[in-house]
Amino acid sequence: MTTKPKVPPVRRSERARSAILTATTELVFEVPYGRLTIEAIAARAGVGKQTIYRWWPTKGAVLFDALLELSGGPDGVALPDTGDLRADLGLFLRATVAEMTEPRFDAFLRAVMIEIQSDPDLAEVYRERLLAPQREAIHERLRIAVESGAIRADADLEVAVDLLVGPVQTRWALGLGGLTEGYADSLLELVLAAVNPS
Amino acid sequence: MTTKPKVPPVRRSERARSAILTATTELVFEVPYGRLTIEAIAARAGVGKQTIYRWWPTKGAVLFDALLELSGGPDGVALPDTGDLRADLGLFLRATVAEMTEPRFDAFLRAVMIEIQSDPDLAEVYRERLLAPQREAIHERLRIAVESGAIRADADLEVAVDLLVGPVQTRWALGLGGLTEGYADSLLELVLAAVNPS
């Protein structure tokens, strides 16, 4: 009597979960999101459709977990702090522009954008798990700059965070283009002027 | 022999077109956009499905024409010019915040957002017909302010337009909330500081 090597159920689940998230990430780049189906994800991952529905209620929920995996967890959200505000925010803005214009990330984020317009619960999770930590990291860097005198004490830092992220996000979401390093630098100059002491 | 009063074909077409756009605007507020169908629009408008497909290739195309009708054409895009930059931009920002938080307009714009993430051709038309005139109107008001000395001559006005529209647009698109008149005023202060002469 021959037996297959036994894979413990937990590890098998973990493998299936990982295959499903990888399949989702690949397919979002290949297929228009409106035409991406749970069936296609199951086929690519080599699992049954019911395996996906056991863990995720909707396509959007799978997409979101794939995004969390891509984003690499909390380590990805800290802002550099070299003591030089201009250099640190410049790096952050250039990195943001590079990320938003990377074709795979672009396709992925557009799918997320569609989901958060349609599904308020998913939008709430997105804000809590991803946006809030990102915004808090920027806010924290600005707070340090207020303490060191690089930003005036009465500047509204929540609005300053919006000045840093809003223009790039909007150009990206509306497909206005022009997202270059030069753009990141021009934006930086205006934002620094907005919060400058003196 | 009795005859129905005859409606000339052009006028009948015009009526059907108008009924279809009105039905679309109503349904976008009532039904999640992903579940809104051409069939439902046809039924509400009292026309056959084929009548819609004769004029519009997709649901997104109908939605976009309904948006153009809602937006009220080119008259809607001029910015006030009282000679007082702070007052004029303040009015513009408060009006934008009021518009983006109006539930019907919000539902409509979220549907547009979904479509422009999915359909690059529609996104292009959206940018040319609606976004470009809006941005040009803001840019023009800023240019006048440069001439009058209210904005420094070396400010990058395209980025300044982004500072005015990006933060509100991003808070709206990502559902971050906080879109109040007070927010509009705080944003105005930072943008004015960014472009201030001296």
Image (tube, coloured by chain):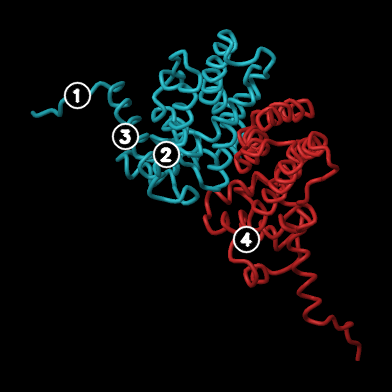
Chain colours: A cyan, B red
Q: Which residue is mark 4?
A: B61
Q: A198 or A192, which lies in front?
A: A198
Q: Which residue is mark 3?
A: A19
What chain does badge 2 belong to?
A
Cα–Cα span, label 4 and label 3: 37 Å
Q: Residue at position x 69%, y 30% from top?
A: B196
| Label 4 secondary element | helix
- Of labels 2 and 3, earlier in sequence is 3
Cα–Cα span, label 4 and label 2: 27 Å
Q: A139 or A29, which lies in front?
A: A139
The lab-note entry on whether marks 4 and 3 share a chain reads no
**What amino acid is labelled 4 in the image?**
Ala
**What amino acid is labelled 1 in the image?**
Lys
The lab-note entry on whether marks 4 and 1 share a chain reads no
Cα–Cα span, label 1 and label 2: 37 Å
Question: Residue B37: horizontal and vertical position, in percent?
Answer: 63, 56
Question: Residue A168: horizontal and vertical position, in percent?
Answer: 54, 37
Q: Which mark is residue A6?
A: 1
Q: Residue at position x 63%, y 66% from top?
A: B56
